[in-house]
Amino acid sequence: MSALTTAGMTAGSIEGAGDFFLGEKELTTGLNNLSTEVSGVIADGGTAGGSGGSIIKVGTGTLTLLGTNTYSGGTTFIGGIVAVERDANLGRVFTVRSTPYKRRTYRRPAGKSSPTY
């Protein structure tokens, strides 16, 4: 994704153990309203390099992030749920509706033994 000539891209959903390299791009995900799990790493960098990659979560589904993600542009919540096991799953900045989010609520997704935010 880092080599895109646009500012970012939209995906119905992302899922799996593969790694996602955002570079400086913005990834909007969740438009198909599915619940998915990403166990791979989401990071800045990639083929074209860059930093400041970000994720925008939309739709009604749950995006479960399990990797130690290092993207630095933040995670913005517009719709649905983002479930994590620890802060490192959210990259470096965490926002809700473009407002910094400081208080966290723990919840446990179905089939998971670890608490999530």
Image (tube, rainbow, N blue to C red):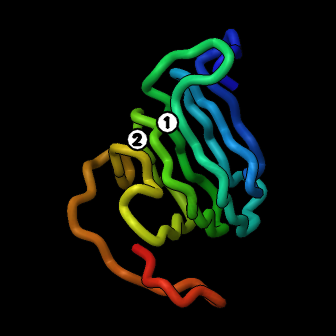
Q: Are marks 1 and 2 in contact (CB under 8 Å)?
A: yes
Q: Which mark is residue 74?
A: 2
Mark toward the start of the polypeptide (1 vs 2):
1
**Which residue position is annotated with label 1?**
54
Image quarter in which the N terminus is found? top right
Q: Is residue 97 above or below residue 105?
A: above
Mark 1 lies on a secondary structure that is strand
Q: Is 116 placed above or below 17 here?
A: below
Question: Distance from label 1 to label 2 (Cα)?
Answer: 5 Å
Q: Count all numbered tags in the image, as a single digit.
A: 2
* Residue 37 located left or right of residue 104: right
Determine the secondary structure under disc 2: loop
Residue occupying image coordinates x 56% and y 30%: 26
Q: Is residue 19 left or right of residue 85?
A: right
Residue plotted at (66% across, 39% down): 20
- As shown in the figure, which amino acid type bears the numbered disc 1? Ser
Under mark 2, the amino acid is Gly
User: Is residue 92 found left or right of 13 in the rendered image?
Assistant: left
